[in-house]
Image (cartoon, grey):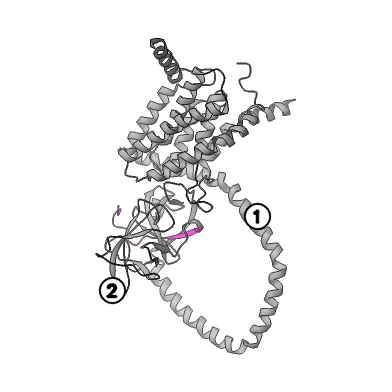
Amino acid sequence: MSASRDDFGIAFRSALLQRGAAQKFSLFSLIILACVIFFLDVYGFTFMKPVRAVINDGIYKVSLVVSSPSRFVPKATESVTSLFNIKRENEQLKRELEIYKQKELNVEFLSNQNKNLKKILESEESFLKKESMILSKVLIDKTSPYLKSIIINRGSKSGVLKGMPVLDKEYLVGRVVETNYLSSRVLLLNDLNSRIPVTFGEEGVQAILKGVGGNRPLLEYLPEDFIVEEGIDVFTSGKDGIFLPGSPIGKTMINGEVKLFSESSQLSFVKVDISNQEKENF
Amino acid sequence: MPRFKLMQKSINFGPLILLYYLSISEIDTYFENYFEILSFNIQLIIIYFWCLKRPEVFGNGHIFFAGLINDAVMGIPLGVSSISYLVTSLVATYVKNMTVNTSITTDWFTFFIAIFSSNSIFLILITNFSDIILSFTEISYNTFFTLIFFPFFWFIFNFYNSAINTGKNV
């Protein structure tokens, strides 16, 4: 029995401390070093913030380059597939064109009118929003079973601060949770750690939209005995003072889940609302 | 001849390159589009297999750095994945020291101990010392599927192992 214990001790010590021809560091020393780094990072010592930001920026850039082949292959496959479909699509379009030609006069008048109205609307919208929105590219959207987040190519250099809302077209997709000099991490609405105050329905029901890790976040803190109807638009309530009220998020489902307007796995470009520059909202 | 040597060297570095590539690239092993709960951790399988079969292929320092890179990409506190990977390596080294002949079944069983220890430490550190909320169920699924897929990778890596000559004369 004691010989067996001795064997265990010897083998365990050997595994921890051994340094062979290929091992420059013992496992023990590296585990201790990893623990030190972990606690320095977790307890947020002031010198760790810039260090982590530099490491993140560097690694995100390398990751972007390294991931480019994996992005290229699906795009190339898509192009080849679409090439095969072109002929069929072309014939179909020719038929449709004949139909549309017959309605041309009527459509031309309506479309011109529509274009003019859109121009007026766009000029007003851009006047209001250009200064407070910055467009950014999604660098990395590595899907994790635990965390739902993306990395964007705008950081503190562009005025991005923690807590700023991030939108895909006009739909809210998440908020900034980490800023580096040249990049930022955005926590998506469906992440377990996400909580957003929302409002919906004609009565303006208030609730908290909680990420559950899956594709559809859940409405919580609803009024007592409240039954959620399907197909009602959900908007940010702005109660937290972080998000502007009225940003559309998704539609309710019968079980209290919300089907998001924006598919988080399909994000290429997003907009960051940098209007609130006063402090980090987190 | 020098060309052959270069090729052989590249083959020897294969597992190490794969480990770094999986840690830094956007490629993930989370297949929610196909099957919502399907996710597994190839890095742990790579580390366990090669530490057990051919520790000369990559050193502990590389495991440590791959963990740090993975933490930065995933947005979790630095050092957690390093500790998790090093614990897997520790179990593999211990098993290697204690056993002479191993088969797929013994490797599979001991891998369960390694992955259980590794993921337990990962979960304990994240839930107790950081603000991140993790789903215990997701980690359990991840552990389960990593364990299930181990034999598949065992056969692939075993085949690859025969092409490597690092440490054959050690």
Please, is residue A8 above or below residue B40 in the view? Answer: above
Who is closer to the viewer here, A215 or A160? Answer: A215
Q: Are marks 2 and 1 in contact (CB under 8 Å)?
A: no
Q: Disc number at residue A99?
A: none
Check disc 1 and report the residue beneath it.
A76
Quadrant of the image for the N terminus of chain A?
top left
For the residues labelled 2 and 1, the Cα–Cα distance comes to 49 Å
Q: Position of residue A242 (x, y in %)?
A: 30, 60
Q: Position of residue B59 (x, y in %)?
A: 52, 25
Check disc 2 and report the residue beneath it.
A203
Q: Position of residue A192 (x, y in %)?
A: 37, 51
Label 1 sits on a secondary structure element that is helix
Please, is residue B117 above or below residue A173 in the view? Answer: above
Q: What's the residue at 73%, 29% (across, down)?
A: B3
For this orientation, the residue located farthest to the top is A3
Q: State which region is magenta.
A: A266-281
Q: Disc 2 marks which amino acid? A: Glu
> In the image, is residue A277 part of the stretch drawn in magenta?
yes
Magenta region's main secondary structure?
loop
Q: Mark 1, chain letter?
A: A
Nearest to N terminus: mark 2 or mark 1: 1
Q: Mark 2, chain letter?
A: A
- Residue B17 seen in the figure: no
Residue density around tag 2, few if under 14, some if 14–19, many if 20 or more, within 10 Å: few
Who is closer to the viewer here, B130 or A213? Answer: A213
Q: What's the residue at 41%, 23% (across, down)?
A: A29
Instruction: Classify residue B125 by image quadrant.
Output: top left
Q: What's the residue at 32%, 58% (across, down)?
A: A277
